[in-house]
Image (tube, helix red, strand yellow):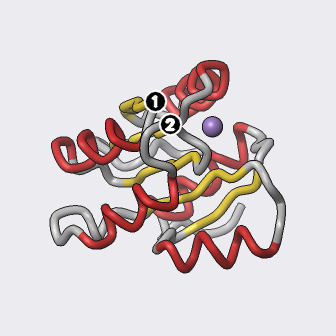
Amino acid sequence: MTSPRAGSTILLVEDNEDNRTVYRVILEHYGYRVLEARDGEDGIRQAREARPDLILMDISIPIIDGWEATRTLKDDPGTAHIPIVALTAHALAADRTRALEAGCDGYLAKPVEPRKVVAEVRRWLEPAEPPA
Ligand code: MN
């Protein structure tokens, strides 16, 4: 695999510490810079301050859930352009529809294998790369 574009920053909004660690370690392994937030309020704040290249958004998070946090960021001209990939605990078709309605650009059903997270990130940050 080639290295990601220099300077790509991912904001990981996830309340489960084990998941945060697993996703951070593999994303950093592939050269991404990873910021972490544990709830929707902090996720919104960090997205506005750091303007990451992509956001991985767990849906079930405290204070402000992932649906509402996504809507808030997509309604804000300063953050609307940032791709948001939802991580939901339910592999339901209804969740996929809801993710798209909330403004999410992508969707992964948990449990998400770390390599699938990397693949989805690369799909957004390196769209020009030919398939292996
Ligand atoms: Mn959660």
Q: Quadrant of residue 34?
A: top left
Q: Which residue is mark 1?
A: 38
Looking at the picture, tell me which residue is in the foreground, 103 or 118: 103
Q: Is residue 56 left or right of residue 119?
A: left
Q: Is residue 1 left or right of residue 102?
A: right
Of the image marks 2 and 1, the number of the one nearer the N terminus: 1
Image position of 35 with respect to 55: above or below? above
Q: Quadrant of the N terminus?
A: top right
Task: Respond yes or no on whether mark 1 lies under 8 Å from ligand 1.
Answer: no
Give the SS element for disc 1.
loop
Q: Quadrant of the C terminus?
A: bottom right
Q: Which residue is mark 2?
A: 62
Labels 2 & 1 near each other (Cβ < 8 A): yes
Residue 79 percent coordinates (x, y) = 24, 62
Residue plotted at (51% across, 53% down) = 66
Quarter containing ligand 1? top right
Image position of 47 with respect to 72: above or below? above
Disc 2/disc 1 C-alpha distance (Å): 8 Å
Residue plotted at (53% across, 46% down) = 2
